Image (tube, grey):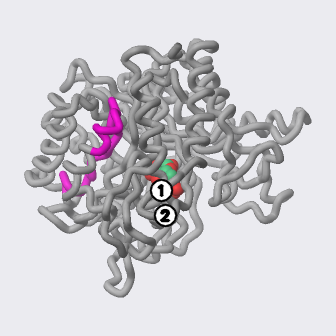
Amino acid sequence: MSAFPPDFLWGVATSAHQMEGSYDKDGKGLAIVDVLPAGHQGEYPDALVVDPDRRYPFHHGIDFYRTFREDIALLAEMGIKCFRMSILWARIMPNGDDETPNEAGLRHYEEVFAELAKYGITPLVTLCHYEMPLELSRRYNGFASREVIELFVRYAEICFERFGKWVKHWITFNEINFATSTPFPCSGVFFGKQPRSEQVMFQTAHHQMVASAKAVAAGHRLIPDAKIGCMVNAMTAYAKSCDPLDALEELDADREVFYYTDTMVRGHYPAYAKGFLDRKGIAIEQADGDAEALADGTIDFLAWSYYFSRVAPLNPEKDPLITDAQRMLGILENPYLARTDWGWAIDPIGLRVTMNRYYDRYEIPMAIVENGIGAKDEVVDGQIHDPYRIEFFKAHIEQIALGIAEDGVDLFGYTTWSGIDLVSASSGQMSKRYGFIHVDLDDNGDGTGKRTRKDSFYWYQNVIATNGADL
Ligand code: BG6
């Protein structure tokens, strides 16, 4: 028997820049991701320019801009009910502050939505997934400037007006909580060689949450039957020990994410925000109307990604090797958990814990919009046998079923990362593969681009067909 509601949105998740390619086609402007060269392995480019001597994986992606019809047909064959995708802001507003939108960009997404409609697939659309017009970063330092709030809202309104008849499920920002840890991809904020400023990052986060809330309100006005959410990377934390001091550390680690979800679900900053910011010596400037905007634009559902759990405290003084990036990814070893080839803890039960932590706190509908394993796949005689991927998803979906059936969590969708292999966001690699569909491209972008169904394709097809009853 299935634990999942009959209309459960089984699907896959993607983002525009990791798959579209055609970075300079049909009037698109440069996006911040277009200056991230291969092997960047971090948060920043060296400069906000394209260097002709370097390779830029996001310039080419997997060519989805041109192959979307064939790729959607394959995903439809797998049976997906929902396709999470993003719109590339710079295709619609090439410079971010243009007088008029780029018609070719708008038409492209209409074609994608029409294609999804052909198969009855529900689109779940993110307005900003780790990219924005590069000009906004160059001229305004991204969301560090208040001006970008209105530019984002205008872009969102254009999308709502033009795509509202196709798209009812929206997410404003991907993993908005990374504004305070990876500010370039998340918010277009570029510190260059300067040390990162927490003051700037938290101010940026404020602007971005206000922008999200204003877009939610605009979406409700323009598409009355829309459901609009925002999204965080859950990064669930466990205390390192039963020492009460570690419990406090865990609370702090969780609040790094709750700071965002509390504000966006409840429409105001949580009580602990003041002390949390005071301890960091940060003062956020709020303009007239910001508090009202946050209150008016609360989200209809909470979306989150889940890849791993973390261990708190990760104290750089006690654990001198822990860098910010390691800290973010919970690199401190959890002896109970295995890790992926890229060092991410594999923790299916943590997924159920996360469902409960959020649902206990908010009791609003939720969707898990990213979950998956980056793995190296081998093509043997034209086939890809990926039992590790099947095992990963089976273990995680079992926990989701328990979260729904035993804990009563109101979860309406699950979109795996990803459906089809695409370029890794953090490493720019193709070899860190997430799809059920293999794409013949290597880390240098060489290959035929041929699509091949992996074993996991047939497995997920059956999971969807049985509404999660047969794992
Ligand atoms: C999520 C991002 O955090 O992680 C995706 O929203 C990303 O864009 C995914 O691809 C997996 O991370 P990576 O770096 O392995 O591609």
Residue farthest to the right, as pictured: 243
Q: Amino acid at mark 1?
A: Ile
Residue 53's x, y, as percent? 36, 87
Quadrant in which residue 162 is drawn? top left
Q: Circle 1 sits on which residue?
A: 384
User: Which of 114 and 312 lies nearest the eye of the viewer?
Assistant: 114
User: Which of 441 and 127 lies nearest the eye of the viewer?
Assistant: 441
Q: Circle 2 sits on which residue?
A: 380
The segment highlighted magenta reads 74-93
The residue located at (26%, 40%) in the rendering is 153
> Can the viewer see residue 427 in this picture?
yes
- 444 lies above or below 14: below
The residue located at (48%, 18%) in the rendering is 4
- 219 lies above or below 114: above
The residue located at (31%, 29%) in the rendering is 169
Total numbered circles: 2
